Amino acid sequence: MPDPSHSEEEGAGDGLPPIPGKRYFTIGEVSDLCGVKPHVLRYWEQEFPQLKPVKRRGNRRYYQRHDVLMVRQIRNLLYEQGFTIGGARLQLSGEGARQDASQSQQIIRMITSELEEILELLKR
């Protein structure tokens, strides 16, 4: 029976197979595990600095578990959430979260000031 504590992290909710408990995966295995073609994986390596598989003899790529999880995260941002490559890169770097927090703080300040104005009007 699969371990439910890993289902979210491993993308069980999006129809992808569970990640086997092994140390290294070939590009073909990652392609199957993540539902992404090998040429797309190679392209994403150029676009996302977080994705760095180990390269061994003959420049063969070997992905580790954290790489497979990163590919699934990138896939989710691009295919499910509709981010552009640049937007997904920002999300993964944490910059997107910082921008969201900054916008939220501005909105909160604006609402607070409007509520204070309404309160002053009601006091009259």
Image (spheres, helix red, strand yellow):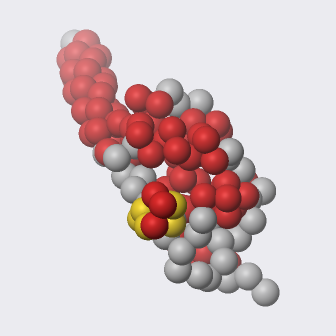
Compared with 111, 8 (above or below) is below
Residue ID at (51%, 66%): 62
Compared with 69, 123 (above or below) is above
Q: How many marks?
A: 0
Provide residue 36's location: percent of width, then percent of height: 67, 46
Q: Residue furthest bottom?
A: 1
Residue ID at (67%, 63%): 29
Residue 101 in view (yes/no): no
Provide residue 87's location: percent of width, then percent of height: 42, 30
The C terminus - image quarter: top left
Between 54 and 93, the residue placed more toward the observer is 54
Rendered image quadrant of residue 119: top left
Provide residue 113's location: percent of width, then percent of height: 21, 21
Compared with 86, 6 (above or below) is below
Q: Residue furthest front?
A: 58
In the figure, is residue 45 to the left or right of 95?
right
Compared with 6, 79 (above or below) is above
In the figure, is residue 93 to the left or right of 13?
left
In the figure, is residue 25 to the left or right of 55?
right
Residue 24 in view (yes/no): yes
Provide residue 23's location: percent of width, then percent of height: 53, 80
Rendered image quadrant of residue 117: top left
Between 120 and 114, the residue placed more toward the observer is 114
Residue ID at (52%, 71%): 65
Between 109 and 58, the residue placed more toward the observer is 58
In the figure, is residue 16 to the left or right of 11?
right
Residue ID at (79%, 87%): 1
